[in-house]
Image (cartoon, grey):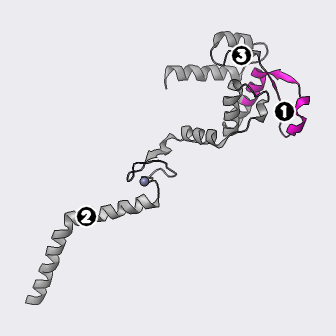
Amino acid sequence: MQRTDKQSLQALEQFARVDAGSIEEWRQRWPDFFPADFSKRGVRQVPPGVSMIAQPQFPVIPLWKGWRDVLLQAWREAFPLTEVIRLTVGPVSEEIDLLSSVTEHPYQQALLLMAKDPWRARFCSKCGKPFVALKANAKFCGPECFAQSRLNTKQRWWAKHGPEWRRNRSQRKKRGRAA
Ligand SMILES: [Zn+2]
């Protein structure tokens, strides 16, 4: 693991343990971890299961607190994509004052799925186009390329062994006649 990766993870770990008494100390130790205005922003926190229609009634809490709560939730639940996207988008989005209302778009989900299983990113052995492997041993982008490659294998076999195969066959026939 790269040194910068280790440091990021260390900062995240320490942030997950932060409270009102230690946030300032954390901020001084990791000043660039979040966007500059992160510590000044507020967010409305909607408790789980509460209808979004009632949102203006919820008090504004510091963004770092709301973010930490979602982080802890993600920590407990093995980082589900929905939480990861909320956490990723919340601090950089201008419009969002509701951390809990961020829903993931399919493009974000797809990118995260690829990052989680990078072995899925492949190029087809037949047509060369990029494709997402659903199985570990996938080599082709679809049934068409698979079938064509089978055909090629057969053609290659014939080009190499065809003459010999024909020779053997005609010899068998001759022997048959001679007997
Ligand atoms: Zn292909």
**In the rendered image, which residue does mark 1 sit on?**
46
- The local secondary structure at tag 1 comes to loop
Q: Position of residue 172 (x, y in %)?
A: 14, 81
**Mark 2 and mark 1: span between their CA atoms?**
66 Å
Is 56 located above or below residue 14 in the figure? below
Badge 3 or badge 1: first in the primary sequence: 3
Image-quarter location of ligand 1: bottom left
Quadrant position of residue 45? top right
Disc 3: residue Cβ within 8 A of ligand 1's nearest atom: no
Q: Is residue 103 visible?
A: yes
Kind of residue at badge 2: Trp
What residue range appears in magenta?
Answer: 42-70
Q: Is residue 80 visible?
A: no
Q: Residue at x 10, y 84 (%)?
A: 174
Q: Position of residue 119 (x, y in %)?
A: 48, 43
Q: Is residue 148 left or right of residue 156?
A: right
Q: What residue occupies the far left of the structure in this picture?
A: 178
Q: Residue at x 18, y 72 (%)?
A: 165
**Mark 3 and mark 1: span between their CA atoms?**
22 Å
**Mark 3 and mark 2: span between their CA atoms?**
66 Å
Is 23 located above or below residue 162 in the figure? above
Please give the label number shown on residue 157: 2
**In the rendered image, which residue does mark 3 sit on?**
37
Kind of residue at badge 3: Asp
How many neighbours does mark 1 have within 10 angstroms: few (below 14), some (14-19), or many (20 or more)? many
Q: Nearer the viewer, residue 155 or 29?
A: 155
